[in-house]
Image: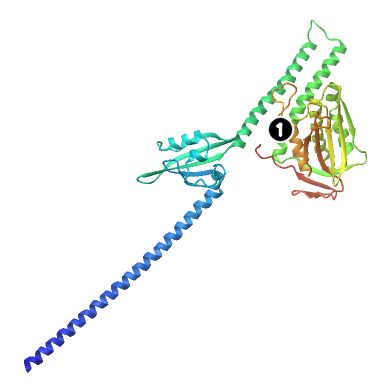
Amino acid sequence: METLLALLIACLLGAGGFCAYQRRKLKQLAAARCSQDDEIDRFRLRLQELEQESLRHSAFVSTAASVAFDAILLLDEDLQILSLNQSAARIVKAESAIGLRLPDVIDSDDLRDLAKHTLSEAESLDEQLLIGESNYRARAKAIDLSGDARYIGIAMQDITDLVHLNRARRDMVANISHELRTPITRIRLIIEGLFLDADKPKRKASIQSLKEIAMETDALLWLAQELLDLSMIESGEAILRLVKTPLNQVVDDAIARLESQAETKHLNIVSHVPQKLDVLCDADQLKRALANLLHNAIKWSPPGDAVTITAAESGDEVVVTVFDNGPGVADNVRERIFERFYQADVSRSGDDGTGLGLAICKHIIEAHGGRIWAEDNSQGKGGHFLFTVLKADAEFEPQQAAIDDGDAQELELPETAAPA
């Protein structure tokens, strides 16, 4: 009996010890699970932070690429397009270029060769190329994002306007050189003829020679004035003072300024501007614009003909027309003739200039709140230039205007951008 009791006690003690062991084991497991849950929570929190950082980085890259003026493309080794921004999307010929090969969506052998050569170069490659009618400066670089794959990044900057500007400036230098050489050479020859000892000039011949010198000097002064006008317009130093002014007075002053040039070609400048017609203008600047139009008309008019100026009211505006019987303006260049340095007669078959006069007219007229354009005349030939200027009683509130003494307005001529 005692033995049985001892055995029973031993079993109970063993069971109690086992239960205590299990309880300790369960506590350890519970503590380990809590630790694992905490670790999982930490990993989950870190994963969320990485996802948010990835989203921010992706949004930054996508936004930067979307607002960039340059066209940006990402290609794989087979020249398949993996990504492109909005600027690049405007160049490709397909609605969705993702997944298509570069040669299939952009017709440019130079761009394709640039992308291929990039794979074999460690440094980035630059090249100027032509796509359609636009000039681009392209830069390409190979990118290693993993050990077994290479990608190609291409950025293309549209430099069409810059190319046109450089060409225009080269043409301007050539035109100015041409314009300066002719009058300077003539003046030199005339002066040498006046002072030849073997052939003493007579009074009548001397007067004619002096007139020719004066004419060539006027041409040089006109060229210098055009360059000065353009410089002041581009620098913002030309200030308009808008006041009530009789239009016929401005027209008469402009005609007087060009009288000697008209007499040289035996031209008659006729004004049909009403006497009582007042406009809101800067008389000096408007006279300059009108003189440029008259100079252009005189240059292209046949000798012995006439140049006509008319003016008519149209609502709050006055439409001024300068009409001549010269060759006129072709339809395909009618918009471009107001560009800086542009000349319709590139062959120099006749008298040409710097290509600045009509551009200066455009800036002056637009600063007055008006418009300027060219049309054909009713006979189907001749130059027909029109511009508008506000009537004196019209309301005009320019963005940079300042009232002076109660009856005048001042504003700066708009600054010119790099061309077109």
Q: Residue at x 51, y 38 (%)?
A: 138
Residue 116, how many percent across, how many down? 44, 36
The quadrant the N terminus occupies is bottom left
Q: Residue furthest right?
A: 275
Q: Residue at x 51, y 52 (%)?
A: 62
Indicate whether 149 appears above or below 303. below
Residue 254, how many percent across, how many down? 85, 32
Applied colour scheme: rainbow
Query: Closer to the camera, 44 or 180?
Result: 44
Which picture quadrant has residue 229? top right
Indicate whether 278 appears above or below 293. below
Q: Residue furthest top?
A: 198
The crowd level at tag 1 (other Cα within 10 Å; few <14, some 14-19, many 20+) is few
Task: Determine which residue is flagged by label 1.
Answer: 332
Residue 7, how many percent across, how many down? 10, 88
Q: Secondary structure at mark 1?
A: helix
* Total tally of numbered discs in the picture: 1
Q: Residue at x 70, y 41 (%)?
A: 415
Query: Closer to the camera, 169 or 60?
Result: 60
Which picture quadrant has residue 236? top right
Amino acid at the residue labelled 1: Asn
Indicate whether 162 appears above or below 214. below
Q: Residue furthest bottom?
A: 1
Residue 222, how many percent across, how many down? 77, 28
Query: Closer to the camera, 99 or 352?
Result: 99
Which picture quadrant has residue 197? top right
Residue 149 left/right relative to 199: left
